[in-house]
Image (cartoon, rainbow, N blue to C red):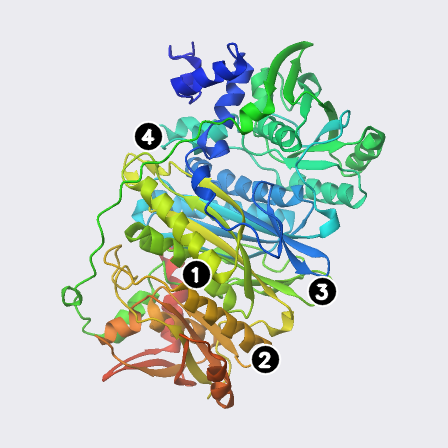
Amino acid sequence: MGESGKPLYEELGLLATEYDRVVQLMGREPTDPELVMFSLMWSEHCSYKHSKPLLKGFPTTGPRVVMGPGENAGAVDVGDGLAIVFKVESHNHPSAVEPFQGAATGVGGIVRDIIAVGATPIALLDSLRFGTLDSARSRFLFRRAVEGIGHYGNCIGIPNVGGEVQFDDRYEDSCLVNAMCVGVVPHHKILSCAAKGIGNRLVLIGNRTGRDGIGGASVLASAELGDDDADKRPSVQVGDPFTERKLMDLCQALNDADLLVALQDLGAAGLTSAASEMASRGGVGLAIDLDRVPLREQGLAPGEVLVSESQERMLAIVEPAKMDAVVEMARRHELDATDIGEVTGTGELEALWRGEEVVRIPSLYLTDDVPFYDVPRDPAPAPAAIDLSTVPEPDDLSAAWLALLGDPNVASKRWIFQQYDQLVGAGTMRRPGGDAGVVRIPGTNRAVAVTLDCAEWHTEIDPYAGGMASVLEAARNVACTGAVPIAATDCLNYANPEKGSTGWRLAESIRGMADALTAIDAPIVSGNVSLYNESPRGPIYPTPVVGVVGLLDDAATSIGSAFHHHDDAILLIGYGEPRVDASRYLGRCDGAPTAPEPARDAALFRLLAECARQRLLKSAHDVSEGGLAVALAESCINGDVGGQVAIPAGRRADEAMFGEGGGRVIASCDPRHVADVAALAGEGVHVVQVGAVGGDDVVIDAGSSTARVSLREAAQVWEGSIPQALEAQ
């Protein structure tokens, strides 16, 4: 029995039926350390027991895919014998409890996933969700999470080149912190996590093991947060970015010297997860002597050593003849490299503690024999389109425009990314603040464009279309740089899948994402699922964050979002009619947004890539939140030059200006190239010249209505919104 008087398995988060399954598999009662291991490996965070069956619907293969889901990160071929490696992961629940360390160690964890594949990290991104900035709690979480991301990323020397943030009261008690890392590796240097070679040594590299993070996976990320969050603070890992940098350099050096057989990050569930995944992936066993594990503090029980989530640790498989070289190289990097066991042919995970066997579990029991569950699929009521007559028309379109630019969800995120080092490594070509970050692939003339995005309101209302919209929004951002989207990663942030319509939304949004990814030929190569993001106050919005990587064959052809020269033509490219439904202008998650059309987006992406290759466009910027008016203002502000456009009023001038939907891009070019751009457009993609760059104001004529804001005032409102919201409280 546990300390509470309940069965120990229940205190550890296992259901009675799951405990019975453990006993049946083992043919006996598990030891306490074994039970702790099962509880974490069978937790939602480690096993994906509610989502894994659904994830099989994703496209995961393609001519560029070198390594798909199942390893530490995915890898895609980018030519010259190189692969780009990338993944996004969540650190939501820890960040809600201790935002600085939760966010910081989220960065550290995703970086180690890239290191584990043998890659050199070249870029970081982050996707964030918090409550509104009029909440003291949300301001605190927001400030501290951003500080944690900046501190860790800046110390390890990886540029942060992009991301997104949204504020909504649905995230008040359950903030989201998703971190993405991108790396590069030669094909022949890619490492797997699969252990192999009977008699090879099991080597723990990096930091020492302590009590920090114990229970983090099962306690924090596999249950809803409640009023006792402060009691969970010890479960949050503590990061040391300077040790992470040494670990990153050491792993790179070990891989360069061909000293590693396999490599695995110690993340959630610590040594238990790393060892069981390495063993099961390789079809071998691992024998561990827990007395050899270097400890930061004394008095740890064997179960604590096995599941500690102390940071900055890696587990490696090393040939016996190479052990001395590994230990010596680690010593030169001021790190431990400790032989803690060996590869066996038993297929079992064994652990000794003070000479006695405390664990003997077939590794597949922990990784493959997890009980999986079908989520309930109870549909939410079908949405009804907004009756435009119920939406008051603004008395002053210009004032409404400025108000929208001042919405923290629309306004500049400079306050965030100015805290991040964007240029370290000298590979950044497009900084944060545009549609996507662009980073040169070292040693080549190529570059990758990377971004994170999500359409949570759309997903709440219509999860299938919202899943598509999340993919296409991210891919459109990448395409606006001139890059061709080639692959994706995802982080599925949802509430309790066993309640309400969450399970249905999860299943339907995955189906929508899969269809969009197939249409644009960008397979999923890695990802993460984070469920139970809710509190007594209620659930978060379904938030399927999508990271897309695009390839530029010539880095010099990348396009930015800013206007450049007076008298350049302004073009509206794409498809779709704007609607106020679920728009930032409407200001609420309501209505029935129009469904995206992935085939037309694919044609749009091809057009943008060809225009970049031929150097026909000077800028391109996605029309998304805030509609055409916000996109136009942003391109003007970023270029420090005004612009004037004329568009049809449609059903109403405010909807034409601020409505959202479809796949639209606002671009600029030399007037002589307008016809060339139009001639390249494929079926379903429209190219219309709507105005010209120039002047000191930003002006829109929507039918007979005109809205005008001065460039200077628009910039002040847009840039000042978030800093003022933080300073005014």
Count residues near mark 3 (Cα–Cα under 10 Å), then give few for <14, some for 14-19, many for 20+: few
In percent of width and height, residue 122 lies at: 64, 54
| Amino acid identity at mark 3 | Thr
| Amino acid identity at mark 4 | Asp
Count residues near mark 2 (Cα–Cα under 10 Å), then give few for <14, some for 14-19, many for 20+: few
In percent of width and height, residue 565 lies at: 50, 84
Q: From the viewer's perspective, is residue 254 above or below residue 296?
A: below
| Amino acid identity at mark 1 | Leu
Count residues near mark 4 (Cα–Cα under 10 Å), then give few for <14, some for 14-19, many for 20+: few
Disc 1 to disc 2, C-alpha distance? 24 Å
In percent of width and height, residue 206 lies at: 69, 33
For label 2, the SS is loop
- The answer to which of 405 and 589 lies nearer the viewer is 589
For label 1, the SS is helix
Circle on res. 614:
2
Foreground mark, 3 or 1, reads 1
Disc 1 to disc 4, C-alpha distance? 38 Å
**Disc 3 target residue:** 444
| Amino acid identity at mark 2 | Gln
Circle on res. 472:
1
2 or 3: tag closer to the N-terminus = 3
Q: From the viewer's perspective, is residue 423 above or below residue 175?
A: below
In percent of width and height, residue 402 lies at: 31, 70
**Disc 4 target residue:** 227
Residue 449, quarter of the rendered image: bottom right
Asked whether the viewer can see residue 728, the reply is: no
